[in-house]
Amino acid sequence: MSNIPTVIFKDLGVIDYKEAWDFQEKLFKQTVQHKIDIRNGERSDATPNYLLFCQHPHVYTLGKSGSKENLLLDEDGLKKYDATYYEINRGGDITYHGPGQLVGYPIFDLDHFFSDIHKYLRFLEEAVILTLKEFGIESGRVDGLTGVWVDFDGDNPRKICAMGVKSSRWVTMHGIGFNVNSDLSYFSHIIPCGIDDKAVTSMEQELGHKLDMNEVADVLKKKLAEQFSYVYS
């Protein structure tokens, strides 16, 4: 019998943020309860792992450690730009999701992998870094900051992928916002992740042309599996 973890992959397409959040919460709570049941001797089957990919209509989300002052729009401004706003239960500050951004939500039981949230974040970052490399974009990390950056060791670091996660009993939810063909003007209405002295970018911005979202998603899906050493069921 193989000890290689398996992951159930679901592409949710373009989906309302709240609808996707509710679906995540459902899977997350089921997995946490499954772990409790195993610990109580009520079941013995392994917990599942999920990876959800999607895109969202324009939305701003604020993490638990963030400040609403980093949203520069009021209610009328949100309506003007056809955007919604949610205060949510992940770590981190404010971020933007919208069409052209590839969003990834791993609902992993880290007991299948390793019990280390910092390592988990570094593995997510590495999968994105390796994905970008496939498309000819060099990227990396900036000391003290989560996420993936272009020109990371230069004078003008630009964030291309933001991250924010929640975990309980080593089960994760939320994840990454990877700017592929994102409308970067929407970032001008926030102080992204509370960082006011760094720019944001996208693959389209860096390469000068739009990319096939499915092609980028396929590469990222593969790199995540390689990084975490799992297979898709």
Image (tube, rainbow, N blue to C red):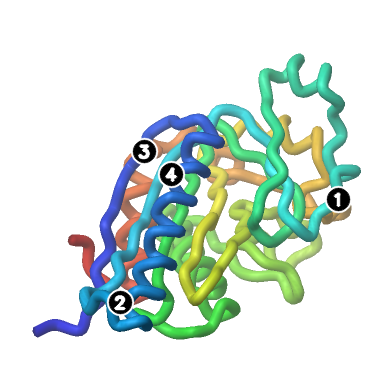
Task: Give the spatial CA distance, label 2 vs label 1.
Answer: 36 Å
Image location (x, y in percent) of residue 36? 40, 75
Element class at badge 4: helix
Query: Percent x, y for residue 6?
Result: 24, 69
- Circles 2 and 1: CB distance less than 8 Å? no
- Point out the tag, 3 or 2, that comes first from the N-terminus: 3
Q: Earlier in the sequence, mark 2 or mark 1?
A: 1
Nearer the observer: mark 2 or 4; the answer is 4
List the residue tagged with mark 1. Answer: 67
Measured as percent of width and height from the top left, residue 178 is found at 54, 49
In terms of sequence position, does the residue under pointer 3 or pointer 4 come before the other? Answer: 3
Q: Position of residue 32 (x, y in %)?
A: 43, 67
Going from the N terminus, do you reach mark 2 or mark 4 first?
4
The amino acid pointed to by label 2 is: Ser
Q: Residues within 10 Å of mark 4 (few under 14, many from 20)?
A: few
Mark 1 neighbour class, 10 Å CA radius: few under 14, some 14 to 19, many 20 or more = some
Do labels 3 and 4 touch, CB within 8 Å? Answer: yes
* Residue contact at pointers 2 and 4, CB within 8 angstroms: no
How many tags in the picture?
Answer: 4
Q: Say which mark, if any, is on residue 229.
A: 2
The amino acid on which the numbered mark 1 sits, given as a three-letter code, is Ser
Q: Which residue is mark 3?
A: 12
For the residues marked 3 and 4, what is the alpha-carbon distance in whole angstroms? 10 Å
**Residue 59 location, quadrant:** top right
In the visual, does 15 lie left or right of 151?
left
**Which three-letter amino acid code belongs to the residue tagged 3?**
Leu
Residue lying at 36% horizontally and 64% vertically, measured from the top left? 223
Which label is found at residue 23?
Answer: 4
